Amino acid sequence: MSRELLQRARTGDALALNELIERHKEMAYSIAFKYLKNKEDAEDVVQDAFVNVLNSIKKFRNQSKFSTWLYKIIYHECLKQLKSKNKAIEYVPQFAQWEPAAEDLKEEVGVEEGLNQLNANEFTVISLFYLEEKSIKEINQITSFSPANIKVLLHRARAKMKEFYNKKYAEDEG
């Protein structure tokens, strides 16, 4: 992301701020939807997070990437929403409908189905790691999961997806 775009947004340039939001809204929604399992709740959380960004952009200190800061806000807004509804993340059903974040991901055969096999934490970690190319350290900053826990979640997500694809292709051949 260009530093110039971020700097313009910090000085109140509405076009720059819109560009930042446009670049990240799909992944933000995907994360929120995976946790909340409800389109309206996910949209509300994303909207609240972007309002938070609008109100706080001038305070952003470049200590992390903008996207890391934004996804941390999304993640914590999801936790607040779950807490307000007295839902615990551990009890979020594993097999919820997922709406892909990346345009090219929609074209991949079976990727959506594979991602549907993951629970919310696995989905968030694998999406941030592979789709957003976040490091373990950045994912730690976003989720507060320990680096070891992030590695375990990545391992489990890969294993679940591998098992799913092995079964899927075995059925297709048989």
Image: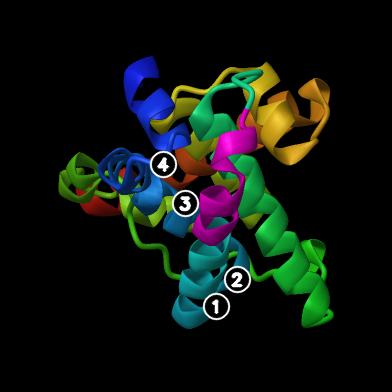
In the picture, the quarter occupied by the N terminus is top left
Q: Quadrant of residue 132?
A: top left
Give the mark nearest the N terminus, 4 or 1.
4
Say which residue label 3 marks: 28
Of the residues tagged 2 and 4, which is closer to the observer? 4
Give the mark nearest the N terminus, 2 or 4.
4
Say which residue label 1 marks: 41
Q: Quadrant of residue 17?
A: top left
The stretch in magenta equals 50-60
For residue 87, say whether it is visible. no
Disc 1 marks a residue whose amino acid type is: Asp
Tell me the CA gap for discs 2 and 3. 12 Å
Give the image location of residue 49, x and y in percent. 57, 58
Residue 52 included in the magenta stretch of the image: yes
Say which residue appears at 71% left-offset and 72% top-offset.
81
SS at mark 2? helix
Residues at badges 1 and 3 in contact (C-beta under 8 Å)? no
Give the mark nearest the N terminus, 1 or 3.
3
Residues at badges 2 and 1 in contact (C-beta under 8 Å)? yes
Residues at badges 3 and 4 in contact (C-beta under 8 Å)? no
**Which labelled disc corresponds to residue 36?**
2
Say which residue label 4 marks: 12
For residue 108, say whether it is visible. yes
In the image, is residue 155 above or below residue 88?
Answer: above
